[in-house]
Image (tube, grey):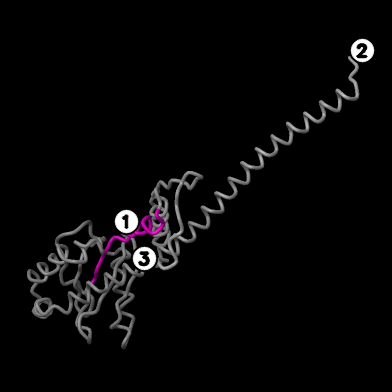
Amino acid sequence: MRFPTVTLRTGLGLTIVMMGLFTIALVFLSEEIYRNHAIENQRAALVDLVELKTDDLLQVLGSNAGRLGLELQHDQNFRAAFKSRDRNALEELLDNRFHQYFVTAGILKLNQLKVYDRDFNLVTGSTVGQLVPAAGSECTSITAATQSRSGAERLKPVTRLCKSGDQPYLTVLVPIGLRPDGYLQVVTNPFMISGDLRTSWACRSGCPGQVGKQTICQKTGVTRQLKVRPWSSTTHCNQPPANRF
């Protein structure tokens, strides 16, 4: 069987055409690989930044919760009700905080306020708010950690991330008085920082907020599954200005 002969010029032309097609295919393939690699690097960098920003916002959230506790325990009516162990008056004063500045201004998403005596026996708690951390959970064990402190350390507020069931909380324990005579526990929802994360990154999607929630779940050991929209070439997330980070 004889094969058709191909001239040197034809063979050279076909070789050049095939090499050109191969080069074009390689360019498109390389572009896709490098694009995906760049997106993955950007995603990893943004996740790291969001985790750092989450820690900063949690510190601010804990500070604001401590401010609420200090403001409440300096109230003369609260001190009088606490000294006389007037449960009804205490509950009314605690419930009123759910309708005042820190909550109405959106600074805190308050879950519950609790009052303990100096031996960490529960005196009473607020009757409004969302679900309360269950007794014996990590959120109530903060009292045991505070009992081991002595001297001036007992006068410092204690802030801790904890979980009750499948719900993470940020809880702050504020001493009442200088002895101290008791303690006030402020329990808040840490997920409220997700809106601040999204605003900080001027992001059209909810990526930073969801990553922040995942970070909180990891810190508290919550195994809740959160749907996170992955970053892509069409996701517009900008790093926050230097003065906001």
Residue 107 location, quadrant = bottom left
Q: Callout 2 environment at 10 Å: few (<14), some (14 to 19), or many (20+)?
A: few
**Principal secondary structure, stretch drawn in magenta:** helix
User: Are the residues flagged by discs 2 and 3 in contact, CB closer than 8 Å?
Assistant: no
Q: Is residue 34 left or right of residue 194?
A: right
Viewport quadrant of the C terminus: bottom left
Q: Which residue is mark 2?
A: 2
Residue type (three-letter) at the residue carrying disc 1: Gln
Where residue 71 appears, x then y in whole percent? 19, 76
Residue sitting nearer the eye, 188 or 46 = 46
Residue plotted at (27% across, 73% down): 66
Where residue 88 appears, x then y in whole percent? 7, 69
Q: What stretch of residues is rendered in magenta? A: 185-202
Residue type (three-letter) at the residue carrying disc 2: Arg
Q: Earlier in the sequence, mark 2 or mark 1?
A: 2
Q: Which residue is mark 3?
A: 57
Residue plotted at (39% across, 54% down): 202
Residue 26 in magenta stretch: no
Q: Earlier in the sequence, mark 2 or mark 3?
A: 2
User: Are the residues flagged by discs 3 and 1 in contact, CB closer than 8 Å?
Assistant: no
Q: Which residue is mark 1?
A: 167
